[in-house]
Amino acid sequence: MRRQIRGFWVAGSMVAASALLSLQPLVASTRMVSLAFNSHLQNPQQVGSDTLRQKLQALAGKRIILDERVGGALGSENAILAATRSGAVDVAVLSGGVVSGAIPEMGVFDIPFLFRDVAHAKAVMQGPVGAAIAAKFADKGLVLLALGKQGFRDITNSKRPIRSPDDLKGLKFRVIPNPIYQMTFKALGAEVVPMEFPLVYAALKDGRLDGQENPPSTMAASRFNEVQKYLTLSDHFFAPIAFVANRAMFEQLDPSDQEALIAAAKAGAEATWQSQLDAEKLEQLRRAGMDVIDKVDRQPFIDALKPLEPEFEKRFGKDLLAAIRSTR
């Protein structure tokens, strides 16, 4: 894996700070800031990270150098989240469904069929609801810099077309280790198998799993078309991307550098909201031979999940759910 650091290509997953600093003359106040994400290339996390890096270089290029640690260099997203909370990583770009494991309030965004479309999700996350949830990060040693778009998540499997909840019954189905994801697919009748993402391709290939759910960009980058036949555009979850920083590191930055980092993260998030990567990758999956079920009646899925509504209201509050659903 190669990483670009202020115009230099550097090989490897980690480079000692002394080696990085020798690449160019630095002013006394220069600070090394590590940036981590765990996804394949041509993924919204990379889109956001690239834009963050470019914007930060323009705003604070003489004061901050990014040490990028991408792909599997630091392990799973849960490992990166833990490293960011501990201070081993300074800034991370992570799936919202993973972050909600540490910030329960953010789990409200995991509720199935909560958002009408991308514009609705963006309005909620950039409005008062998003601001209120951002305030919850402080107690977890984190700062939420911005929220972006991973995309709507869809269903693949190797057994049969999925057109109704009945078609999911009995399928061994991978979800991320997230309680709302798990209860959702259990309610839809699947045999739920929580699993870290790096293990999924092999499990689909050898039959330990029948199916999984992800945005099309992730499916294409992971070559799931090689081990999955059917893709249903269910749009059951909307997956945000969280741009987060270690709180102690952030508070040590000069105010101007804090502003620069926030502005860079917001630019990265906006790049993900504008990205058409999912549509492009969906067409790639079609061309690769996947059977895409794109005319889906979502109402039977929504009806099957209605028994979960009291649990969601208990966790997040009826008023909050109503506020999200009424946002325009």
Image (cartoon, rainbow, N blue to C red):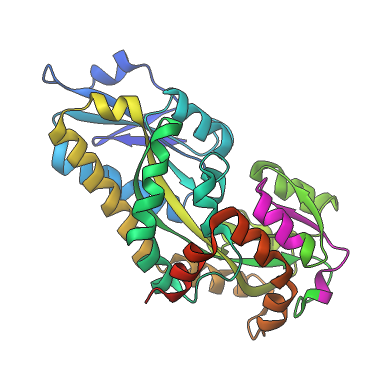
Q: Residue at the location (39% across, 65% down)?
A: 124
Q: Is residue 92 above or below residue 85?
A: below
Q: Farthest top residue?
A: 18
Q: How many marks overall? A: 0
Residue 108 position within the rendered picture, expressed as x and y whole percent measured from the top left: 53, 57
Residue 93 position within the rendered picture, expressed as x and y whole percent measured from the top left: 42, 43
Q: Is residue 326 above or below residue 39?
A: below
The answer to whether residue 25 is left or right of residue 4 is left
Residue 187 part of the magenta segment:
no
The answer to whether residue 318 is left or right of residue 247 is right
Q: Is residue 225 above or below residue 8?
A: below
Q: Residue at the location (67% across, 85% down)?
A: 297
The answer to whether residue 300 is left or right of residue 235 is right
Q: Residue at the location (18% across, 41% down)?
A: 259
> Which of the image's four quarters has the C terminus?
bottom left
Residue 270 position within the rendered picture, expressed as x and y whole percent measured from the top left: 31, 59
The answer to whether residue 22 is left or right of residue 189 is left
Whether residue 73 is visible, yes or no, is: no
Q: Farthest right residue?
A: 170
Residue 176 part of the magenta segment:
yes
Residue closer to the observer: 90 or 108 = 108
Q: Which residues are magenta?
A: 166-185
Q: Residue at the location (66% across, 66% down)?
A: 309
Whether residue 206 is visible, yes or no, is: yes
Among the 4 quarters of the image, the one containing residue 182? bottom right
Residue 252 position within the rendered picture, expressed as x and y whole percent measured from the top left: 24, 23
